Amino acid sequence: MIKILHRSIILLFAMTMGACGTSSISLSVMKPADITVSQHIKRIAVVNRSFPSKKTKVENILEGVITGEGIGQDRDGSEECVSGLVDILTRTERFDAIRPAIELEGTGREAFPPPLPWEEVERICAESNADALLLLEVFDSDSKFTHKIVQEKSKTKEGVEVVRDVSEVTTDVKVTTGWRLYDPKNKRIIDEYKTSGGKSWSSRGSSEEDARNRLPSKRNTVRDCGFIAGNFYAQRISPVPVRVTRSYYVRKHPSLKKAKNFVRVNDWNGAAEEWKKVLATGDNKQKGRAAYNMA
């Protein structure tokens, strides 16, 4: 009942906005980070610590043979995960991200290893001239195939509709990642965060084998999911620009109409001056619309 009421309110608001004369524009705004990182941290060294130890590596290879997972695909995926994070951070003004040429052993599974000793954290940061150390400490992937027969409609040259059975295959890939952000100055782990996410790929063919052959390889799907996961964590610790759509009122007052011309050319100061005129001279409804636009 609550969901129905909520949807009704949204629909009513949308209808009201449309009836009152609005326009919309797409613009870039800064999305705040999910967590606050101390301002003394500017340069971050990013290192992959998800590689398994020699003992665990043998176990992972045996597990990969049994389950059919590609040997080394998690290693490739974890490297893409780090690349995805660095790709976002290097395009923001908040942090400088660097990748020291070192490898650290972890569990190679979904469990976090023990925190890295502070002496090691300080050494890496000193050698990298970094203010903090960000480690990818967990990376694990899981793939699942499903197959079903579906009906596909098509038309012959004569325009006759034909229905035939085809094979549809879907691969669902899930990756689990875990990160720790170390602050050597205060000897504090700022963030310890583990999450899972995935993506699906589907294809159709004359047979199950034909449909499977049209799918990207397991290695590539894990790499793609890893890169996306790295992007996702970067947005947790750093403000990032995102595209949004905003609606605003453009009618019922001369200055509301005039402000639209300023908005179209991204002259927000000019638009604001017109909206301020509405706040000073308009009636209560007009003032409300101008206040909404300002917000």
Image: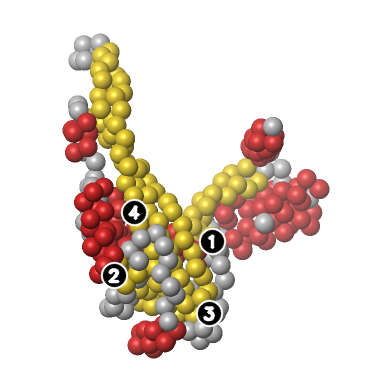
Q: Residue at 67% of width from left, 38% of height from top?
A: 6
Residue 21 vertical placement versus 130 (above, below):
above
- N-terminal-most mark, 3 or 4: 4
> Which label is found at residue 79?
none
Q: Which residue is mark 4?
A: 141
- Neighbours of disc 1 within 10 Å: few (<14), some (14-19), many (20+): some
Q: Residue at 67% of width from left, 43% of height from top?
A: 251
Mark toward the viewer: 2 or 1: 2
Q: Position of residue 90 (x, y in %)?
A: 39, 71
Front one among 139 and 259: 139
Residues marked 3 and 4 touching at CB (< 8 Å): no
- N-terminal-most mark, 1 or 4: 1
Between the residue at mark 2 and the residue at mark 1, the CA separation in whole angstroms equals 38 Å
Between the residue at mark 1 and the residue at mark 3, the CA separation in whole angstroms equals 26 Å
Please identify the quadrant where the N terminus is shown. top right
Mark toward the viewer: 2 or 4: 2
Type of amino acid at the residue the image marks with label 3: Arg
Between the residue at mark 3 and the residue at mark 2, the CA separation in whole angstroms equals 26 Å
Mark toward the viewer: 3 or 2: 2
SS at mark 4 in the image: strand
- N-terminal-most mark, 1 or 3: 1
Q: Which residue is mark 2?
A: 53
SS at mark 2 in the image: loop
Front one among 18 and 131: 131
- N-terminal-most mark, 2 or 4: 2
| Left or right placement of residue 235 versus residue 136 in this view | right
Q: Position of residue 130 (x, y in %)?
A: 41, 83
SS at mark 1 in the image: strand
Q: Which residue is mark 1?
A: 31
Q: Which residue is mark 3?
A: 188
